[in-house]
Amino acid sequence: METGTLVSGVLFVALWLVFVGLFARRMIYLGRLVLHGREAVRSDDVPVRLSREVTRVAGQSKLFLRPIPGVMHLLIFWGFLVLLPTIVESWLGAISPHWSIPWLAGQAWFALMVDLFALGVLVGVAIAFVIRLGQRPVRFVGSRLQQAYNILLFEAGIVLTLFVWRGSQVALGLNEFPAAWSPISTSVASLLPNAPLTQVLERATVWVHALLILAFMLYIPYTKHLHTLVVAFNVFFERTRARGRLEPLRFDDPDLPEDQIRFGMGTIADMTWKQMVDGMTCTECGRCQDACPAFFTGKNLSPKLVIMGLRDQLYREGHQMLAAAAGKGTFEGQPLVPNAVADETVWDCVTCGACVRECPVGIEHIDHIVDLRRNLVMVQSQLPATGAAMLRDLERTSNPWGNSPTERVDWTAGLGVRVLEPGDAPPEVLFWVGCAPAFDERARIGAISTAKLLKEAGVDFAILGPRESCTGDPARRMGDEYTFQGLAKQNVETLDEAKVTRIVTTCPHCFNTLANEYPDFGGRYEVVHHTQLLAELLRDGRLSPAAGTESITYHDSCYLARHNDVRSEPRELVAAVGRPIEMARREERTFCCGAGGGHMWLEERAGQINEERARQATATGAATLAVACPFCTVMLDDGMRSTGGGLAVKDVATLLVEAVERGRARPTDSLEWVQ
């Protein structure tokens, strides 16, 4: 071995050990934090998880919800994947210009791929700079833009020095691949000076290139670019069950040690390992923030800043927490609210799921926010006054309106609806009415219409009447998990005693809770939304509507379209009764009415989400706004009144009743529609 090679080798290996050692120390620290996180069970549905690695990580599918940023990220992501072997090549080349990876160095196809994919990285970096410096999207507000610029400069520097180094190798004849298969490197070679200077340039650029890679490697775990190392892990362990389901707290699990029982998230010591990895994976892209209706209407909430705030506090206090776990002192972490997340921010969330739907890296924002609420409500008794009043009514009367349970059947007056009594034979379908249709004058019209249509179609159905209690959805989303679980167990017991197998409900919140959350408490039923059942009856010819000329725009409920993928059936009904006009934000990318997350009962302190949605509906020029949720009925009717939009807000079932009226051969047989 030549003296120069020996000196270069010793120097480079020493530097390599320093950089890699510092990188490993940081990654071990982050790994210890994750291992210290509370339990989160994510070991099911392995085939689904593996498929997501292919589609979401390798294929970058969710990034293409925004095509131009999607192309940008795909070019950079796949560019650096293909260029991974050149990292080893540059480290070998820094020691000696004649060292390279055996076999690979002489492959013409690899030379071409390096040139093309490296060029792709540069194009991707250029697009990223145009987006950040030219377009300046609002979604980047609050992000650490200097970190993003540093990362892009690192990436550009690595690729540019790669081209100069490989070009100098071409000029000096140090490579083994044909020049025709390396068009860019060959073009660079043609621009280089005479041999002595090129020899110096070759040595200088390979060292700069190799050191840039080492510096970038060390920079990554201290920045948002850590996502490149953990995103595959986070996407793999993303929830696979229904998006609308929340993980239950295990209060009375005899197999769970007492010190592992969680009451939400009060300090970083309460975070699950998945919540920790969520923070480490955040790219600060702001897609969640851009989709958030609370942020859009001027509220204090940014889902992105929630995750960033929790992550930053985890990093600040992590060393102290780990030291305490090792018996070196005690850990008294600062409360996450208000230190990491402002109190107002926690209560601005409507749990619509737009943030989770848009996130390309598997972050579950709602779980974080609801866990913060759980700790505030169940441990600290801190919540908005209107929310506290709602929870008191729920505990006292089993409904958030505070009405007597006997009033649950008042809406059925004159309809001949059967109330299922103890010991009665179970009906074909149990109509789970829900609290809003039972106690709110506007919301009950949809339930009345649904009952009429079921009778018209000859469906054997009944209701529980006073035996029905709130599903507990408002309590759970507000953070009162204890009250929710009490209601859930009570309702499951009632449904099981009644031998119910199929349930229909007009409320997407009840639908989500009964279908996706009650199985955690032993309640397994076939649950359908009324739009699904009515569409089924329509297809079977058991309902015969006559379409009118009325223009109708349909509002997708978040808990129906986004959380539970019910999108086509309501549109079937709208198409059967009138002339559909779609809103810009629809289906899985719908805009919330503002009622979710307990906001039906919370006093609004900033922008009105329902008014914004009313304006979006008005902009379509439609005459009627169709809804499929009692909460949406009330919120959007209020929004229309306050904005002067003028659209009539009607449940799709009500529109279908009107269409069936039009289609009846004998006017004397009409279905009487109760206003």
Image (cartoon, grey):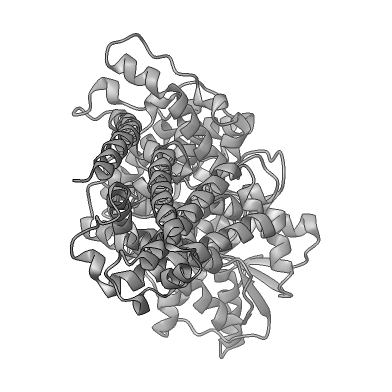
In the rendering, at what x and y percent does residue 456 appear?
Answer: 47, 76
Task: Please tell me in which quadrant of the rendered image residue 668 appears.
Answer: bottom right
Q: Is residue 549 left or right of residue 577?
A: right
Between 548 and 517, the residue placed more toward the observer is 517
Q: Residue furthest top?
A: 329
In the rendering, at what x and y percent does residue 416 appear?
Answer: 48, 64
Residue 261 visible (yes or no): yes
Residue 527 visible (yes or no): no
Between 44 and 20, the residue placed more toward the observer is 20
Q: Is residue 344 left or right of residue 93?
A: right
Between 590 and 219, the residue placed more toward the observer is 219
In the rendering, at what x and y percent does residue 267 appear?
Answer: 44, 24
Q: Residue at x 25, y 59 (%)?
A: 50
407 lies above or below 195: above
Q: Residue at x 24, y 71 (%)?
A: 107
Q: Residue furthest bottom?
A: 665
Total marks in image: 0
In the rendering, at what x and y percent does residue 529 appear?
Answer: 43, 63
Q: Residue at x 58, y 34 (%)?
A: 387
Between 155 and 374, the residue placed more toward the observer is 155
- In the rendered image, which quarter contains the C terminus? bottom right
Task: Please tell me in which quadrant of the rendered image residue 576 appears.
Answer: bottom right
546 lies above or below 177: below
